[in-house]
Image: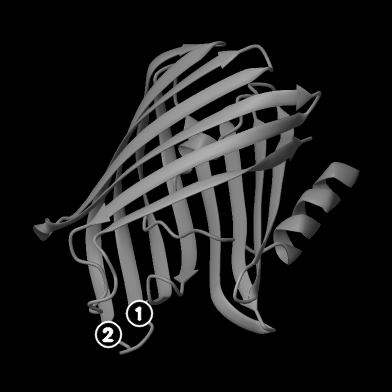
Amino acid sequence: MLKRIVVFTLLFFCSVPLYSQIVNIESLRSAADSNGWYGVENFNVTYTKNTKELFELNNNFTAQYKQDKSTWLFLNTWDVSIAADEKLEQNLLFHARYGYQQNGWLTYEALAQYQQNRPLRIRDRVLSGGGTRFTLFEKPSRKGYLGTLILYEYENELDNNIERHDPRFSAYLSAYLAKKDRLQWSTTIYYQPRIDYWEDFRTSIQTQLKLGIIKKLFFVSTLNMTYDAFPVQDPDIPNLTVKWVNGLALTF
């Protein structure tokens, strides 16, 4: 009971950060197969001083609850950059996903997501939908999955209040390797086109490496690259965005 209270308290008070257009949930799933709670808290602080002082705070919190064939996954993240007492950037994301394992190779999934991303000029983005997740291979030290989903997306741009309502197809292919608790590696490739206009697509690849330091404490290095064929209507926003994050993660 205490673990549940801690999990939901942190989910409520900890917000989230992401520069990428596509949120990689695969790297945040728990490798634990037993019933109950599993969580990861990852907090990073960066201080830079040249012509002025810059503080960057990054918090990622993930919680998973598994009960027999059902799995609930919650993600809450927050990014903020502060210089001279002024907030330069702020990003927020909340993601919830439910999965029901029909058998050893098929899982049904449903999800809901809310996102703000000021660097990419996104005021609000809401995603909801569902689909299937196929197990390609699954052993304690290596796993592979293929996912296909149908999504509804609402987006409101930050500077011009342009609104979009789009149906999207989402497909992902992920692989996971581990050597006991000392080394974990995962890579996921996403492809998300608009169903009614396939030239409007997003694709993303994320690679994450986790190295065990002491029990339940890991060094985590994550590289994320995303290409958006049609970002918001702002000439300063590039099609390709890259983010590389290094920090510590505490599991419980």
Q: Residue furthest front?
A: 51
In the depicted view, which residue is nearer to us: 240 or 180?
A: 240
Most extreme residue toward the right is: 2
Q: Residues within 10 Å of mark 1 (few under 14, many from 20)?
A: some
Secondary structure beneath dot 2 equals loop
Q: Relative to residue 151, is residue 26 depicted above or below? A: above
How many marks the image carries: the answer is: 2
Q: Residue 1: tell me if it is visible.
A: no
Task: Kindly state the secondary structure of the residue where label 1 is placed.
Answer: strand
Q: Which residue is mark 1?
A: 156
Q: Amino acid at mark 1?
A: Asn
Q: Position of residue 38 (x, y in %)?
A: 71, 35
Does residue 243 show up?
Answer: yes
Return the x and y of residue 22 as percentages of the image width and height: 38, 53
Look at the picture and state if 92 lies above or below 8: below
Residue 92 appears left or right of 67: left
- Residue at x 26%, y 53% (from the top left corner): 227
Q: Earlier in the sequence, mark 1 or mark 2?
A: 1
Residues at badges 1 and 2 in contact (C-beta under 8 Å)?
yes
> Where is residue 167 drawn, in percent x and y?
23, 61
Q: Which residue is mark 2?
A: 162
| Relative image position of residue 133 (x, y in whole percent) | 37, 32
Which quadrant holds the C terminus? top right
The amino acid pointed to by label 2 is: Ile
The residue depicted at 65 percent of the width and 39 percent of the height is 64
